[in-house]
Amino acid sequence: MEKLIGINQTNQLTSNLSVKKQYLSQNKELFGKEIFLQLEKKSKSLKVVAIHDTWRHALQNEFSKDYWKTLTNTIRRLYKKKTIYPNPKKIFNAFDSTPLDKVKVVIIGQDPYHGPSQAHGLSFSVENDTKIPPSLMNIYKELNSDLDIAIPSTGNLQSWADEGVLLLNTILTVEANQANSHKGLGWEKFTKAVIKAVDKELESVVFMLWGRQAQSFLSMIDENKHYILCAPHPSPLSVHNGFFGCKHFSKANEYLKKNSKIPINWTI
């Protein structure tokens, strides 16, 4: 039984009453007044983040920082009150699907899709049997033009993640029908730590930075260690400004082969 820290600590209770009732029983004279209760246990501060071990080891310092504690408390509260995507079990899908030591390519998105049955923790990707979003369709068109790969019927990019493509969103959660609604909650700091971990721990990784937000990470990547590919975002608003024709998929595979790595099978 947990030891209760407060006044009148004599005769620690051994009944099956709740902690609150036990404390009030010990402190009947304070009932109705402000009671400060501290439990002698280490629970909340030692909660383990449900993320792949390789990432937990690389990011362990982040999980003890104040911003992370504030962020996770906020996200838990929002999931209880509102409709938030993705499913909480899928928040770290990108990390569980692509362990740190398996990363060959990094593709950085913005925030998750904010409609039902879309987001599942991988940037640009949607669940099976969901309409392919315009930006992803443009990615497929470029893939077809570049490597003559047939345009898939699904928008689920899980096979890319399994191949070693870290499909990382800058912000990992979003409120239903409210794009970018979780901007500024703290995810950006976490994403920066992720990019720094990849840059520090690995060699010869391809970074595909599409659009201004993704390219804001440029200063964190050592171009002498890694291969950086920049292009406009594949959104219909900017795809004709240089995304079409960028040939990032073939360039990535050529670089990987040159550095004695198995190229990505981009076929879905």
Image (cartoon, rainbow, N blue to C red):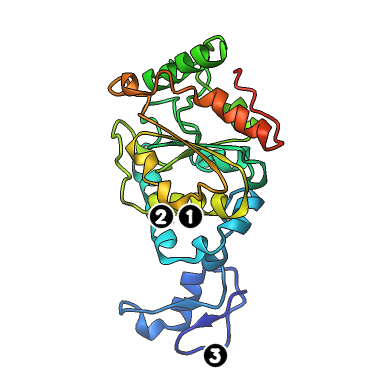
Disc 1 or 3, which lies upstream in sequence? 3
Q: Is residue 114 left or right of residue 249?
A: left
Tell which tag, 3 or 2, sits nearer the viewer: 2
Q: Vertical placement of 239 versus 14: above or below?
A: above
Residue for point 68% across, 31% down: 257
Image marks 2 and 1: residues in contact by CB distance under 8 Å: yes
Q: Which residue was labeled with disc 1?
A: 193
Q: Secondary structure at mark 3?
A: loop
Question: Few, some or many C-alpha atoms within 10 Å of disc 3 (few <14, some 14-19, many ≥20)?
Answer: few
Residue for point 45% across, 49% down: 191
As drawn, the label of residue 10 is: 3
- Disc 2 marks which amino acid? Lys
Give the x, y percent position of residue 198: 56, 49
Image marks 3 and 2: residues in contact by CB distance under 8 Å: no
Question: Few, some or many C-alpha atoms within 10 Å of disc 2 (few <14, some 14-19, many ≥20)?
Answer: some
Number of numbered discs overlaid on the protein picture: 3
The one nearer the camera, 69 or 263, is 263
Q: Which residue was labeled with disc 2?
A: 189
Image marks 1 and 3: residues in contact by CB distance under 8 Å: no
Q: Vertical placement of 106 versus 233: above or below?
A: below
Name the quadrant containing residue 83.
Answer: top left
Give the x, y percent position of residue 216: 36, 45
